[in-house]
Amino acid sequence: MIRRWMLFLGAAIVAATIGAVAARDEPAQTGGIIALDMSGPRPTAQLSIFDSAPVKVIFDTGAGGSVLTSALGRRHNLPDQGDVQIASPGSESTIPAYITTLPRARLGEADISGQRAVVGDLGIPLDGISGVMSPNLFRGSLVRFELKASRVVVVPKRVAAIPAGAASAYHGDHPLPSIEVDIAGVRMYAHLDTGSGRGLSLPLEMVQRFKLKGPLVPGKPVKMAGGERDAFDGRIDGVVVIGPLRLIDPEVTFIARFTYANVGFSLLKGLTVVLDPAERRSWVMEAE
């Protein structure tokens, strides 16, 4: 039977849950520094397979599993270990893909040999990008996205490394970090999604819950696996609180057939986000 995996393509790029495909059976304990290129709309890192030249991949807090392009899979003859179908929520079409196990590979300085990923094409223009990597590769570690310092630090999960303060539990059934946000007095959970180049995105169906400063205006469509979604831009009338961020009358993107609130890279890039994938919890802090 061909399995179908739902890919949550946040407000532009893959933000996916691939369940057990995301990692190998034994939690990865490896550590290391993963340098980030912060010059684009989302952070990228360097992936090396065998001794080949590194390729550019998105390192995405909103990705439940890792996805590599078909071209990269062919280049390294990555083994086909079972068919899957990639889909995004609300999409009627799917994209064929397959599960693989990474051979000798590194993400930045971190060893990810033996981890599992999906190989397939998402139907989204990703010029110069060879995949999307998930922090769930490092289930046995703490994954510190020190975004202001343009790096991710993967460290063993010891008591001294755990941040002070209360953690936010991952919300829902997906292995994606989330945080409770306050949007002009309306509280809800939102995904933390460095793979989205936008700021705060909300389902279009929620627009009636908020007072806006002016009308909604059509925005740039959001590209997802299986097609595009209409998007509209508006401005919240009030204060939005996201962890240490306090935003006055911020712009918000409302997306049709979107299923969750989403905090993207443009808001997270000055912060530190610490993930504990094994225990499904996260911390969002001001950069040190």
Image (cartoon, rainbow, N blue to C red):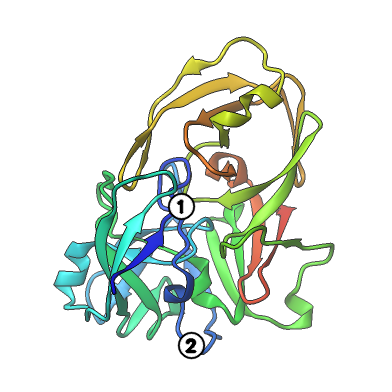
Disc 2 marks a residue whose amino acid type is Asp
Q: What residue is shown with label 2?
A: 25
Q: What residue is shown with label 1?
A: 8
- Residue 58 in percent (x, y) is at 40, 56
Q: Is residue 105 above or below residue 170?
A: below
Disc 1 marks a residue whose amino acid type is Phe
Residue 45 seen in render: no
Residue 155 seen in render: yes
Spatial separation of the CA atoms under disc 2 and disc 1: 23 Å
Label 1: how many Cα within 10 Å (few below 14, some 14–19, many 20+)? many
Mark 1 falls on what kind of element? loop
Q: Which residue reaches farthest top?
A: 214
Residue sitting at x 47%, y 31%? 256
- Residue 40 in percent (x, y) is at 41, 43
Q: Nearer the viewer, residue 238 or 271?
A: 238
Q: Which residue reaches farthest right?
A: 165
